[in-house]
Image (spheres, rainbow, N blue to C red):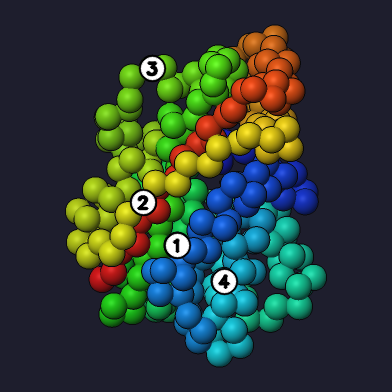
Amino acid sequence: MPNEKYIVDVGDEGSIGLDKLDYCFNPTTQEFLICSGLKSGMIVLDIGCGSGAMTCWIAKQVGNNGSVIAIENNKNQLNAAMLRAKKMGLNNIEFKLLSAYDIETLNQRFDMVYCRFVLHHLNSPSQVIKKIIRVLKPNGIYAAEEGIVNFAFSYPHNPAWGTEYTGPYPWIDNEEQNMRDGNLGMKLYNKMYKASFKIISAKIIHPLLITRDEKNLLLLGREELKQYELEQGKTEIEWVNQGIELEKIVNDDAQIAGFYASCQVAGQI
Ligand SMILES: C[S@@+](CC[C@H](N)C(=O)[O-])C[C@H]1O[C@@H](n2cnc3c(N)ncnc32)[C@H](O)[C@@H]1O
């Protein structure tokens, strides 16, 4: 897609900000995939594998009779994922530098397509959802998971975390405006239904960050998003002050933070 740019400034060793997604969501994503039918022997496509923690877990589940193709359009992320798989001694994963928009060029059909927190970065997620149908085998499963950033909150409220929650909900379909949609999770069921998936399950996951270690995740990977936030109009001083306020949330044991929520939808063709 022209003028589409990933908002995270990914370093040579991959994004450290993704570690917080792994911490907050991997256990519930693993449960979701098992409930959606992930089994030994399956051939799975992982779209936008990031630094590969879930990819490697899936590879272990499908075992040596199965395999995973993991695609990424960022080579640093892909390298980080390949290194992780190598360290774990996994040899049933094929990594490819490829955009989600081009999955049909794989010329392969899958038992399951798994894609988490990738489509909400794209201007046209529906285009990819339609392509997913074409790469699934008959009765194949699409296990989809996308974020809802507007569910973030802090209590007692600190504007440094969860500001969006006080604003109007983004009911508009950003796709019509050719923009990324941080609230795509809200619309995932509808988009998959309209693409003619038979919906098997749908659920919201909303992690609460309570301990200091958990709340520290709010600070992890901030630098990687700084450039994007400045481009969106935040000033340098506002960015610094937000960091100071986030530290106050971390150090106040009476204060909790609701992380971004995630919507999990499983659909079958
Ligand atoms: C928030 S991360 C999620 C990574 C992983 N799926 C996870 O849940 O941990 C989003 C990932 O999507 C990748 N990405 C963004 N646009 C993409 C595209 N058009 N095709 C493939 N990957 C893309 C980014 O490089 C990034 O690694």
Coordinates of residue 171 in the picture (x, y in percent): 27, 29
Instruction: Identify the residue under disc 2.
Output: 203
Numbered disc 2: secondary structure: strand
Coordinates of residue 202 in the picture (x, y in percent): 32, 54
Query: Which of pointers 1 and 4 lies earlier in the amino acid sequence?
Result: 1
Residue at figure coordinates x 62%, y 77% from the top left: 60
Residue type of the residue flagged with mark 2: Lys
Crowd class of label 1 (few under 14; some 14 to 19; many from 20; radius 10 Å) = many
Crowd class of label 4 (few under 14; some 14 to 19; many from 20; radius 10 Å) = many
User: How far apart are the two marked residues, 3 and 1, measured between alpha carbons?
Assistant: 31 Å
Numbered disc 4: secondary structure: helix
Residue type of the residue flagged with mark 1: Phe
Instruction: Identify the residue under disc 4.
Output: 58
Residue at the front extreme? Answer: 254
Crowd class of label 3 (few under 14; some 14 to 19; many from 20; radius 10 Å) = few
Query: Which of pointers 4 and 2 lies earlier in the amino acid sequence?
Result: 4
Left or right placement of residue 192 versus residue 166 in this view: left
Position of residue 5 relative to residue 41, above or below, is: above
Residue at figure coordinates x 22%, y 65% from the top left: 198
Rendering quarter of residue 243? top right
Instruction: Identify the residue under disc 1.
Output: 32
Q: How many marks?
A: 4
Determine which of the numbered discs, if any, sits on residue 167 in the image. 3
Residue type of the residue flagged with mark 3: Gly
Position of residue 174 relative to residue 76, above or below, is: above
Coordinates of residue 127 in the picture (x, y in percent): 32, 53
Q: Nearer the viewer, residue 99 or 52?
A: 52
Rendering quarter of residue 236? top right
Q: Nearer the viewer, residue 145 or 124?
A: 145
Assess whether mark 2 and mark 1 are in contact (beta carbons under 8 angstroms): yes
